[in-house]
Image (cartoon, rainbow, N blue to C red):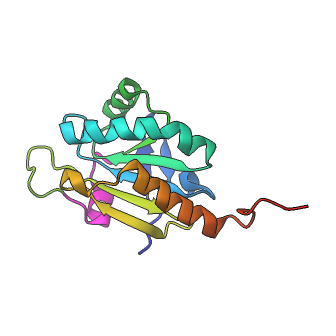
Amino acid sequence: MKLPDLELLDHTGNLRRLSELVGGDPTVLQTYRGPWCPKEQSFFRRLIAFQDDAEVAYTRMLSLSVDPPEVAAAFRAGLGARWTFLCDPERTALETLGLRETTDTTHDPYVPAVFVLRPDLEVHRHYDGYWHWGRPTLDELVHDLRELSMALRPDWEAPTP
């Protein structure tokens, strides 16, 4: 499966293309219900603990919700997250991706999911986070990203004399 090259607003209100944000690196793309959900808050705490490792390992992280930029920016700042939050208040990408959370008719959010992406937006691994235990642990993400990085990086093995 390959994700479409979506064009969405980021948390600052700028239009961004998914392929630009992914660049040439492995990427963790997470869709989430919203900052009001305690399951999301729990998962975000794990991602915050992971962001330093992701940055030094040339790995991108992205989060996507139906929240408008000002809500996403406030949530991001409150968490201390440094990665890009994408916003889909018109729910166009939600429809394209087919990830509508049908049990929440109040917020009409995304189904929580995590995608580990190759640089060409091909899905390396997908986690269905509708139930909390469906979300990846940090160990699972490390395993997925190690596997993907080994396949992508021609210089994975250290040079020998």
Question: Does the magenta portion include 94?
Answer: yes
Indicate whether residue 152 is drawn in magenta: no
Q: Quadrant of the C terminus?
A: bottom right
Magenta stretch: give its range.
87-100
Q: Is residue 160 above or below residue 132?
A: below
Residue, x 46% and y 40% (percent of image)? 50
In the depicted view, which residue is nearer to us: 41 or 66? Answer: 41
The foreground one among 106 and 13 is 106
Q: Is residue 127 above or below residue 15?
A: below
> Residue pushed farthest bottom?
1
Q: Is residue 140 visible?
A: yes
Can the viewer see residue 111?
no
Residue 20 image-quadrant placement: bottom right
Image-based side of 33 in relation to 72, left or right: left
Q: Residue at x 26, y 62 (%)?
A: 95
Q: Residue at x 34, y 35 (%)?
A: 45
Front-most of residues 13 and 50: 50
The total number of labels drawn is: 0
Eyeballing the image, is 77 above or below 134? above
Q: Is residue 8 above or below residue 10?
A: below
**Which quadrant of the view contains residue 152?**
bottom right
Q: Which quarter shows the N terminus?
A: bottom left
Q: Is residue 119 left or right of residue 139?
A: right
* Residue 123, horizontal then vertical, whole percent: 44, 68
Residue 135 sits in quarter: bottom left
Q: Residue 124: image x %, image y %?
A: 46, 68
Q: Position of residue 139 (x, y in %)?
A: 42, 52
- Outermost residue on the right side: it is 161
Q: Residue at x 34, y 54 (%)?
A: 136
